[in-house]
Image (spheres, rainbow, N blue to C red):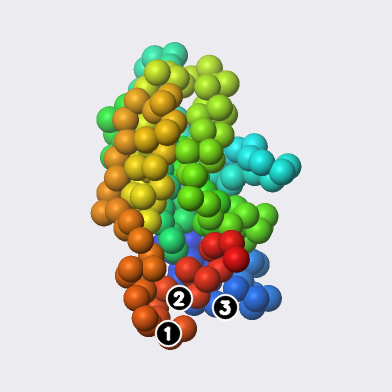
Amino acid sequence: MNCFLRAADYYRQAEFHLEPDDPRRLPTFEHMEACSHKFLQYLNPRGEIVEIPDENGVSLCGYFVRAPFPGDKLPVLICMGGLDSIKDEMWFMQPHGCLQRGISVLMVDMPGQGGTLRRHGVVNRVDTEVPVGKCIDWLEKRADVDAARIAVCGSSLGGYYAARAGCYEHRLAACISHGAIWSITDIRGGKGEDFGLAMHARTSRAG
C-alpha cells in the first residue's frame, strides 16, 4: 500500500513546480489525489474522501480517517498545511501518529490550498476560524466523533491558520501551532518574483 504514497509524492513533486496556468497542473494534481485515494482504501478502517461544505456553494477537499480503536466516539485532529503544502502530504506529519494513539484525523485543504484552490478557486483568508468552524460543523454531525475533543494542528503558515482559529473558534479543545509563520511579507521582504515561494504566495491569495 505504501507504493501508492510513493506514487502520490512523485505526482506532487511534478505538480508543485508547474505554473498555475499550466494546463498540466490540475490533471497532475488529480493523478496525485487518485494515488492517495488508493492508499486510503487499504487503511483499516478505510479512509474517506470528503467534501466539507464551505461558503458560496463550494467545499473544502479533505480525507477523514477513523482511528482503529474501540469506542463509539473518538477525538479528532484537524490537520492542515501552510502556504504550499496540501492534505495529501499531511500523512507524513501528524495523522499517522494520531491514528496510533486513538485519535481520528481530518486532513483538509483550507482556502488557498490544494484541491480547494486548484479545483474550486478558493483563495486563502485571514479569518481561518471560519473554514475551521465549517470543519467542526461537519465533524459534529458524525456519530463516531467526540465533539468535545476536536483539536486543530497546522504547520508553517498553517501554524498561523491554526493559532488564529484557536483564538476565535471556541469549540476547539486544543490547538497546535507547529513552526508557525506569522507574516509571509516579512519572509519575502524585498525579494523579486524569482523568490522560491513567490508563485505560491501569489496564487493562493486574493488580490
Hey, what amino acid is under mark 1? Gly
Q: What residue is drawn where x is 36% and y is 74%?
A: 188
Between the C-alphas of marks 2 and 3, the distance is 11 Å
Instruction: Give the labeled residue for mark 3.
Output: 19
Asked if residue 79 can be seen in this view, the reply is: yes
Q: Which mark is residue 198?
A: 2
Q: What residue is drawn where x is 37% and y is 35%?
A: 167
Q: Quadrant of the C terminus?
A: bottom right
Q: Nearer the viewer, mark 3 or mark 1?
A: 1
Q: Which mark is residue 192?
A: 1
Q: Is disc 1 surrounded by few (<14), some (14 to 19) or many (20+) residues within 10 Å?
A: few
Residue 99 in percent (x, y) is at 34, 34
Residue 21 in percent (x, y) is at 65, 76
Residue 30 in percent (x, y) is at 61, 60
The quadrant where residue 191 appears: bottom left
SS state under label 1: loop
Callouts 1 and 2 close, C-beta under 8 Å: yes
Hey, what amino acid is under mark 3? Glu
Between the C-alphas of marks 1 and 2, the distance is 8 Å
Between the C-alphas of marks 3 and 1, the distance is 16 Å
Counting residues from the N terminus, which is met first, the one under dot 3 or under dot 1? 3
Residue nearer the viewer, 150 or 180: 180
